[in-house]
Amino acid sequence: MNWLAHSLLSEPSAEFRMGNILADILRRPELELMPVGILRGVACHRRIDAFTDRHPIIRQSKQRVNGSFRRYASILVDVFYDHLLAKEWHRHATVSLEQFTSEVYAGIDELPREVPLMARMRLEQMRRENWLGRYREIEGIRQALEGVGSRLRRPVDLGAAVADLEMHYDGFKEDFGMFFPELRKHVEGNTAEIE
């Protein structure tokens, strides 16, 4: 799952949500300096990733990815699933996607001083370009994947993998529809352990 799902599955506090996002941005030495609220969000993020990475439905979705992109299947499925979450937002949330993303972005203004400048700049870019809201559109997914691909050690045009999403859209949608309720139940059943 990518940042939209991580945000939705977070507790509603700004620090927890930001921790759930910052888990992908900060390095371990930086994380060690974070306050407890951020660290709880990081722990939730890791729990989500661990559950997701070993789930059979995720393996099934990865098999839908074209062989030339199979090496990046985990990244692609995470982003594709955020697209499907955004497309069917009304099924999973009680507020509109626009209201929710505004609430998440407002958390950027509440970041503790320990969050490094580079991480703040990345979050500001996320807000400015509305990354979370743009997951709803195929073009938003393409741009997100191009950004991820450009940051890899050896840059790759991951935006081209959107063709796989379009070709197997119904299959990804079915997989997501089965997986996300299980993930949500897993997260809700384990919140007490994130202390």
Image (cartoon, grey):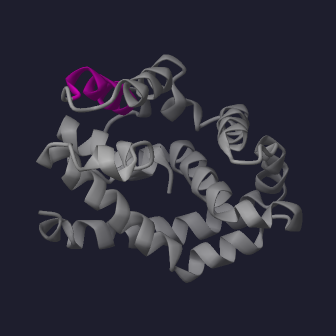
136 relative to 111, above or below? below
Count of numbered labels shown in the rendering: 0
Give residue 56's position: percent from left, percent from top: 57, 82
Q: Is residue 154 left or right of residue 82?
A: right
Give residue 192's position: percent from left, percent from top: 12, 68
Which quadrant of the figure has residue 187? bottom left
Could you tell me which residue is drawn at 71 percent across and 60 percent down? Answer: 72
Q: Main secondary structure of the magenta part?
A: helix
Quadrant of the image containing the C terminus: bottom left
Residue 104 belongs to the span the image colors magenta: yes
Give residue 69's position: percent from left, percent from top: 81, 60
Residue found farthest to the front: 29
Residue 1 belongs to the span the image colors magenta: no
Q: Which residues are magenta?
A: 99-111
Could you tell me which residue is drawn at 58 percent across and 77 percent down? Answer: 57
143 relative to 163, above or below? above
User: As rendered, which of 142 and 176 lies closer to the eye?
Assistant: 142
Q: Is residue 150 left or right of residue 126?
A: right
Residue found farthest to the top: 128
Q: Is residue 86 left or right of residue 186?
A: right
Residue found farthest to the bottom: 56
